[in-house]
Amino acid sequence: MRRNPLFCLVFILAGLAGACTDLDDPPVWVEFSYQVRCAGCMPMAQNNEPHRIAALDGDDGLEVICTADGDKISVGVGYDDDDRAKDWSFRLDSVDVTEAGPGSACLLSVREGSSEYVGSCTDEEPTAEFPCQVKLTHEDSVVSGTIFCDDIPLSGDPTATRNVTKISSNTMPFDFEVQNCEGL
């Protein structure tokens, strides 16, 4: 019995399409590009390598975690790897994604190698007490907005600060988006 090759191709493609669209628990997707920069910081230092991320959880060993509890989300992205090019992480904790602003519990941390910078969040201009401007909202399972940190201190040494910005800028916020956050 001869089979029509076109029929076989349609059958195979229909099966693959069903496999791609029938996800009960879709993976977390994140997209952002940022750089930890020395913008008049003391002590003076070179800028860190930029991070351009557009990936699903698990792509090339990248770990993306996003959980929601009501209107508060926590997002973690990064590698914990011996490969120096992959030794970084980015984390937002307890961000209120309503129009009320990020909330008093919001905390942002970025790690570059052994250096971790940690700061509280605001939706206003950054200050010494709240060095990270975080403006995020959510619609369905998509959280998006902008982030900028001005003089975020090094954990353990508040006199060593950096900016977390759009790549190649000292003062511009970077765009941030995460999809399929668990709990939204």
Image (spheres, rainbow, N blue to C red):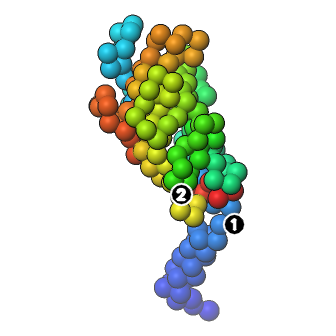
Based on the displayed image, in which of its 4 quarters is residue 19 positioned? bottom right
Q: Amino acid at mark 1?
A: Asp
Q: Which residue is mark 2?
A: 138
The residue lying at 55 percent from left, 30 percent from top is 120
Based on the displayed image, in which of its 4 quarters is residue 81 positioned? top right
Report whether 98 appears left or right of 45: right
Q: Residue furthest top?
A: 43
The residue lying at 58 percent from left, 68 percent from top is 20
User: What is the number of the mark on residue 2?
Assistant: none
Give neighbour class at mark 2: few <14, some 14-19, many 20+ (Cα, 10 Å). Answer: some
Q: Residue furthest bottom?
A: 1
Based on the displayed image, in which of its 4 quarters is residue 124 positioned? top left
Q: Quadrant of the N terminus?
A: bottom right
The residue lying at 51 percent from left, 53 percent from top is 99
Q: Amino acid at mark 2?
A: His
Q: Quadrant of the C terminus?
A: bottom right
